[in-house]
Image (cartoon, rainbow, N blue to C red):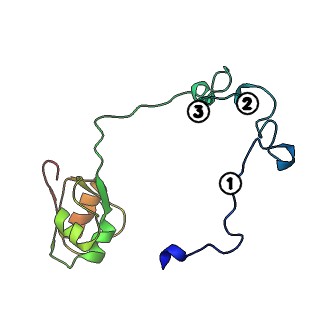
Amino acid sequence: MLNRLKAPEGAVKGKKRIGRGESSGRGKTSGKGNKGQRARSGRGIKRGFEGGQMPLQRRTPKRGFTNIFKTNCSVLNVGRLSEEFPPGSAVTPDSLVEKGLLKNNKRPVKILGDGEINVALTVKANMFSQRAVAKIEAAGGKAEVIEGGV
């Protein structure tokens, strides 16, 4: 059954055959123009090559560096915690994953201080910003630092 399926008339275009006579529209030089490096056979010029001119990638100044000691962490604001957790509950990286606030707990968790928190929670995370600690404690909760990675 499936082997008998055919495309509608005019849906499939034929392959463009080059170098098959002038009247084909792609004869003689086959769309390559006259002479020059790009008209020749073989491997093309490498990406970024500008004919010997200093390429753009090398002309532009380089800035900064990649810090090899950077720790990528999952961040979450305190405003989201008060929306998702009832008063008096404990907030851990595992409970954040269960609620869908974090995708997984493979990375350290950092709590940031954006938003308002109006419920007393015991928040356990790897890192806290100063504003986050102040807001959690002002709401009557506790911010506990978990040592090491997750």
Q: Residue furthest left?
A: 147
- In this rendering, which labeled residue sits more in front, label 3 or label 2? 2
| Residue 11 place in picture, x, y as percent | 68, 69
Indicate which disc residue 64 carries.
Answer: none
For label 1, count other residues whose C-alpha is less than 10 Å away and answer few (under 14), some (14-19) or many (20+).
few
Indicate which disc residue 47 carries.
Answer: 3
| Residue 102 place in picture, x, y as percent | 28, 64
For label 2, count other residues whose C-alpha is less than 10 Å away and answer few (under 14), some (14-19) or many (20+).
some
* Residue with the mark numbered 1: 15
* Residue with the mark numbered 2: 39
SS for callout 2: helix
**Which badge, 3 or 1, is on the more N-terminal residue?**
1
In this view of the protein, which residue sits in the foreground, 134 or 25?
25
Distance, label 1 to label 2, CA atoms, is 21 Å
Q: Amino acid at mark 1?
A: Lys
Q: Taking 59 as reference, is 113 above or below it?
A: below
